[in-house]
Image (cartoon, rainbow, N blue to C red):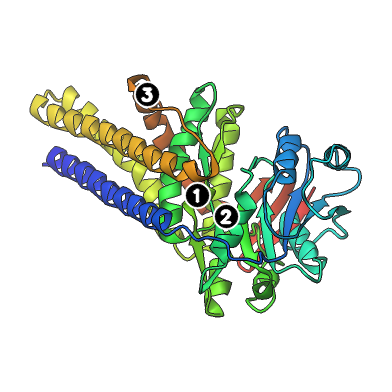
């Protein structure tokens, strides 16, 4: 009885995930078919990059920004944690080199240090609040980018076109991990991110690594005020926009391809937990996200325990049923991951991104690392649900009901 029930729940859960994946594919297909075109004249734009510590990808990220083919005027504003931060000389030298070589297409690039350490809210949120107060008077569109995002030449144009749609106040892409060497932790992150991409798209959760917002909405929507107590900038954005009659929209052509493979399992678990924590703190769909993460791990664990008990008791029929259901579930999840990857591959094409064609070896690697991913996801979700403190880039924060408080740095 229990074996049949668990097998049925496993298959029903797989069916639900199939529906979610098809819904994601449909959303991406519709939006790719209705890809907006930027009207002329293009709005004056300003790209904001916040830095703390050195990312190995920073020179490449700045070079990618310098090569933007945006048809309108635009500026670059870099807010660094302090002048003593190692990111300051690296960013300063890279920008100077790009400008001296005539490779920079921005009008002006400015570096500025974070003026004051906040007592509440994250340092990144404080950097963005400061940047919003220092925008050029002509700026109409504000784009945010992360130091590990090496964007395509048409990135800023695509952001501006998406944001220019009627009723749309902000747009963002998302990330897709394709680890270069295919390491175990790299594949765990890629598998987790594939499922996260589906949920973030369907639940309307933005990604701040590639995001644009109309400048005219930053203050009236209350977003800048929300940042004063927020851990992150992106997850908290849709609610303020909705309150003033605008909406956020995910744009699939803005998915950023990340081939980084340099992460270990323990820091990866903390990283996933922090990503989930932002949803808990700032998004109303957190209960659904938490249910997905906990159920993904608990259901497989219960089925494995029931399988072991059935084998010990000699109930081979029950054991066979559970084993078949588990295999069907895991193989079905791999098939869904390959479907998501195919959808992403098509979305990457307009801005020149390319994914290698999947093969049986790739499918086998996904299958090998999928159970560990489900377990890591469950533990990270539990940790995010119970967390009272969090560390981000060497800064420790205490979580409060009305925001986060800086403890030490």
List x then y, in percent, for residue 317.
8, 28
- Left/right placement of residue 126 relative to residue 321 reads right
- Is residue 209 visible in this depiction of the protein? no
Label 1 secondary element: helix
Q: Nearer the viewer, residue 24 or 189?
A: 24
* Closer to the eye: label 1 or 3: 1
Number of the label disc, if any, that sits on residue 368? 3
Does 356 sit left or right of 401 as displayed?
A: left
Image: 127 above or below 217: above
Q: Where residue 66 sits in the image (x, y, percent)? A: 75, 44
Q: Residues under labels 2 and 3: Cα distance? A: 37 Å
Q: How many numbered circles are shown? A: 3
Separation of disc 1 and disc 3 at Cα? Answer: 30 Å
Q: Which mark is residue 253?
A: 1
Q: Helix or strand or loop: what does disc 2 sit on?
A: helix
Quarter of the figure that contains the N terminus: top left
Residue 383 pos. (x, y %) = 52, 46
Residue indicated by mark 2: 158
Mark nearer the N terminus (2 vs 3)? 2
Q: Of tags 2 and 3, which is closer to the observer?
A: 2
> Farthest residue toward the front?
40
Q: Nearer the viewer, residue 104 or 63?
A: 104
- Closer to the chain start, of discs 1 and 3, is 1
Q: Are marks 1 and 2 in contact (CB under 8 Å)?
A: yes
Q: Which residue is found at the position 85% from the left and 37% from the top?
A: 101
Place residue 119 in its image quadrant.
bottom right
Circle 3 packing at 10 Å, graded few (<14), some (14-19), many (20+), is some
The residue under the point 49% across, 34% down is 354
Q: Position of residue 397 (x, y in %)?
A: 70, 53
CA–CA distance between discs 1 and 2? 8 Å
SS of the residue under disc 3: helix
């Amino acid at each position: 009885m229990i074996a049949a029930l668990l097998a049925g729940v496993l298959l029903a859960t797989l069916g639900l995930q199939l529906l979610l994946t098809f819904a994601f594919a449909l959303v991406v297909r519709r939006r790719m078919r209705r890809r907006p075109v930027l009207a002329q004249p293009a709005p004056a734009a300003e790209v904001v990059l916040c830095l703390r510590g050195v990312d190995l990808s920073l020179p490449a990220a700045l070079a990618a920004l310098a090569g933007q083919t945006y048809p309108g005027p635009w500026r670059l504003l870099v807010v660094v944690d302090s002048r003593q931060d190692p990111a300051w000389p690296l960013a300063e030298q890279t920008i100077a080199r790009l400008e001296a070589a005539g490779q920079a297409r921005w009008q002006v690039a400015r570096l500025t240090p974070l003026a004051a350490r906040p007592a509440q809210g994250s340092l990144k949120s404080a950097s963005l609040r400061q940047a919003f107060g220092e925008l050029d008077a002509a700026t109409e569109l504000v784009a945010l980018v992360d130091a590990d995002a090496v964007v395509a030449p048409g990135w800023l144009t695509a952001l501006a076109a998406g944001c220019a749609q009627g009723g749309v106040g902000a747009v963002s892409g998302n990330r897709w991990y394709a680890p270069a060497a295919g390491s175990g932790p790299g594949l765990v992150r890629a598998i987790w991110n594939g499922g996260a991409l589906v949920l973030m798209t369907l639940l309307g959760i933005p990604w701040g690594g590639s995001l644009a917002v109309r400048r005219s909405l930053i203050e009236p929507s209350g977003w800048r005020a929300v940042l004063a107590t927020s851990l992150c900038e992106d997850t908290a954005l849709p609610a303020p926009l909705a309150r003033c009659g605008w909406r956020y929209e995910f744009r699939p052509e803005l998915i950023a391809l990340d081939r980084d493979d340099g992460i270990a399992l323990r820091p990866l678990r903390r990283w996933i937990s922090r990503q989930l924590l932002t949803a808990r703190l700032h998004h109303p769909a957190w209960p659904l996200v938490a249910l997905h993460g906990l159920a993904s791990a608990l259901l497989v664990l219960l089925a494995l325990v029931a399988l072991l008990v059935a084998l010990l008791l000699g109930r081979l029929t029950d054991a066979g049923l559970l084993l078949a259901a588990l295999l069907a579930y895991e193989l079905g999840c791999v098939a869904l991951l390959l479907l998501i990857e195919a959808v992403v591959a098509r979305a990457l094409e307009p801005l020149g991104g390319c994914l290698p064609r999947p093969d049986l070896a790739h499918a086998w690697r996904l299958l090998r690392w999928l159970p560990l991913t489900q377990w890591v996801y469950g533990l990270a979700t539990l940790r995010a649900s119970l967390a009272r403190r969090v560390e981000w880039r060497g800064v420790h924060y205490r979580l409060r009901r009305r925001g986060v408080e800086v403890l030490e740095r």
